Amino acid sequence: QVQLVESGGGLVQPGGSLRLSCTASGSGFSLNVMGWYRQAPGKERELVARVGTAGSTNYADSVKGRFTISRDNAKNTVYLQMNSLKPEDTAVYYCNARRYASSSVYYDSWGQGTQVTVSS
Protein backbone atom coordinates (compact mmCIF):
# COMPACT_ATOMS: atom_id res chain seq x y z
CA GLN A 1 0.00 0.00 0.00
CA VAL A 2 0.95 3.61 -0.43
CA GLN A 3 0.31 6.59 1.78
CA LEU A 4 -1.63 9.38 0.11
CA VAL A 5 -1.84 12.99 1.24
CA GLU A 6 -4.38 15.33 -0.35
CA SER A 7 -4.34 19.11 -0.35
CA GLY A 8 -6.05 22.00 -2.07
CA GLY A 9 -9.60 21.82 -0.77
CA GLY A 10 -11.47 24.80 0.59
CA LEU A 11 -14.40 27.16 0.19
CA VAL A 12 -15.12 28.59 -3.24
CA GLN A 13 -18.00 30.48 -4.81
CA PRO A 14 -20.13 28.92 -7.54
CA GLY A 15 -18.36 29.24 -10.87
CA GLY A 16 -14.96 29.26 -9.22
CA SER A 17 -12.02 26.88 -9.49
CA LEU A 18 -9.90 24.73 -7.24
CA ARG A 19 -7.02 22.36 -7.83
CA LEU A 20 -6.62 19.32 -5.64
CA SER A 21 -3.30 17.55 -5.28
CA CYS A 22 -2.50 14.10 -3.96
CA THR A 23 1.06 13.03 -3.30
CA ALA A 24 2.00 9.41 -2.74
CA SER A 25 4.84 8.07 -0.68
CA GLY A 26 6.83 5.02 -1.59
CA SER A 27 7.86 3.57 -4.91
CA GLY A 28 5.83 2.30 -7.80
CA PHE A 29 3.54 5.29 -8.20
CA SER A 30 3.47 4.90 -11.97
CA LEU A 31 2.07 1.38 -11.57
CA ASN A 32 -1.07 2.64 -9.85
CA VAL A 33 -4.31 3.67 -11.44
CA MET A 34 -5.04 6.95 -9.66
CA GLY A 35 -8.47 8.32 -8.99
CA TRP A 36 -10.47 10.95 -7.20
CA TYR A 37 -13.69 10.04 -5.41
CA ARG A 38 -16.08 12.19 -3.44
CA GLN A 39 -18.67 11.70 -0.76
CA ALA A 40 -21.37 14.21 0.06
CA PRO A 41 -23.31 14.07 3.34
CA GLY A 42 -25.87 11.29 3.28
CA LYS A 43 -24.60 9.92 -0.01
CA GLU A 44 -22.34 7.08 -1.07
CA ARG A 45 -18.81 7.62 -2.21
CA GLU A 46 -18.65 8.03 -5.99
CA LEU A 47 -15.94 8.06 -8.60
CA VAL A 48 -15.18 11.52 -9.96
CA ALA A 49 -12.25 10.85 -12.28
CA ARG A 50 -9.57 8.28 -12.91
CA VAL A 51 -6.26 8.25 -14.78
CA GLY A 52 -4.65 5.01 -15.86
CA THR A 53 -1.03 4.02 -15.86
CA ALA A 54 -0.72 4.99 -19.53
CA GLY A 55 -2.55 8.27 -19.03
CA SER A 56 -6.03 7.36 -20.19
CA THR A 57 -8.77 9.15 -18.30
CA ASN A 58 -12.42 8.74 -17.51
CA TYR A 59 -14.88 11.00 -15.72
CA ALA A 60 -18.25 10.93 -14.09
CA ASP A 61 -20.88 12.43 -16.37
CA SER A 62 -21.58 15.14 -13.81
CA VAL A 63 -18.06 16.59 -14.10
CA LYS A 64 -17.21 16.06 -17.76
CA GLY A 65 -16.01 19.25 -19.38
CA ARG A 66 -15.42 20.92 -16.01
CA PHE A 67 -12.87 18.74 -14.21
CA THR A 68 -9.51 17.51 -15.47
CA ILE A 69 -7.41 14.78 -13.86
CA SER A 70 -3.69 14.53 -14.53
CA ARG A 71 -0.67 12.82 -13.08
CA ASP A 72 3.02 13.62 -12.73
CA ASN A 73 4.89 10.38 -12.14
CA ALA A 74 8.16 12.22 -11.49
CA LYS A 75 6.51 13.93 -8.52
CA ASN A 76 4.35 10.98 -7.40
CA THR A 77 1.38 13.33 -7.64
CA VAL A 78 -2.08 13.31 -9.16
CA TYR A 79 -4.11 16.46 -9.66
CA LEU A 80 -7.76 17.33 -10.08
CA GLN A 81 -8.42 20.69 -11.69
CA MET A 82 -11.99 21.69 -10.95
CA ASN A 83 -13.55 24.55 -12.91
CA SER A 84 -17.06 25.98 -13.07
CA LEU A 85 -17.78 24.57 -9.65
CA LYS A 86 -21.37 24.08 -8.56
CA PRO A 87 -22.93 23.74 -5.09
CA GLU A 88 -23.60 20.09 -5.87
CA ASP A 89 -19.83 19.52 -6.10
CA THR A 90 -19.64 20.08 -2.36
CA ALA A 91 -18.20 16.94 -0.77
CA VAL A 92 -15.16 15.39 0.83
CA TYR A 93 -12.80 14.43 -1.97
CA TYR A 94 -10.65 11.34 -1.56
CA CYS A 95 -7.58 10.31 -3.48
CA ASN A 96 -7.31 6.65 -4.44
CA ALA A 97 -4.43 4.52 -5.64
CA ARG A 98 -5.33 1.16 -7.16
CA ARG A 99 -2.73 -1.50 -7.85
CA TYR A 100 -3.85 -4.44 -9.98
CA ALA A 101 -2.45 -7.87 -9.13
CA SER A 102 -4.46 -9.36 -11.99
CA SER A 103 -7.36 -8.29 -14.18
CA SER A 104 -9.78 -8.95 -11.32
CA VAL A 105 -7.69 -8.54 -8.16
CA TYR A 106 -6.59 -5.15 -6.97
CA TYR A 107 -5.56 -3.31 -3.82
CA ASP A 108 -6.79 0.15 -2.89
CA SER A 109 -5.11 2.85 -0.86
CA TRP A 110 -6.98 5.95 0.26
CA GLY A 111 -6.09 9.42 1.40
CA GLN A 112 -7.67 11.07 4.41
CA GLY A 113 -9.91 13.32 2.31
CA THR A 114 -10.11 17.04 1.73
CA GLN A 115 -13.26 19.14 2.04
CA VAL A 116 -14.53 21.09 -0.95
CA THR A 117 -17.38 23.50 -0.29
CA VAL A 118 -19.04 25.46 -3.08
CA SER A 119 -21.21 28.21 -1.69
CA SER A 120 -21.89 31.90 -2.02
Image (cartoon, rainbow, N blue to C red):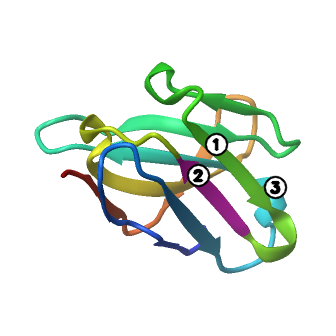
Q: Is residue 109 left or right of residue 27?
A: left
Q: Which residue is mark 2?
A: 81
Is 53 a magenta residue? no
Q: 92 and 8: which one is in front?
A: 8
Q: Which residues are magenta?
A: 77-82
Q: 49 and 85: which one is in front?
A: 85
> Label 3: how many residues lie within 10 Å, few (<14), some (14-19) or many (20+)?
some
Could you say where residue 42 lies in the image, as x and y percent from the top left? 11, 38
Q: 47 and 17: which one is in front?
A: 17
Q: Is residue 34 left or right of residue 16?
A: right
Q: Which residue is mark 3?
A: 31
Type of amino acid at the residue the image marks with label 3:
Leu
Q: Is residue 23 left or right of residue 6?
A: right
Could you tell which of marks 3 and 2 lies nearer the N-terminus? 3
Residue occupying image coordinates x 41% and y 51%: 16
Residue 112, compared with residue 18, is above or below; it is below
Could you tell which of marks 3 and 1 lies nearer the N-terminus? 3
Type of amino acid at the residue the image marks with label 2:
Gln
Q: Which residue is mark 1?
A: 68
Could you say where residue 69 lies in the image, as x and y percent from the top left? 66, 46
Q: Secondary structure at mark 3?
A: helix
3D distance between C-alphas at marks 2 and 1 = 5 Å
Q: Do tag 2 and tag 1 residues touch (Cβ < 8 Å)?
A: yes
Quarter holding the N terminus?
bottom right
Could you say where residue 80 lies in the image, as x and y percent from the top left? 58, 53
Quadrant in the picture for residue 2: bottom right
Residue occupying image coordinates x 46% and y 35%: 47
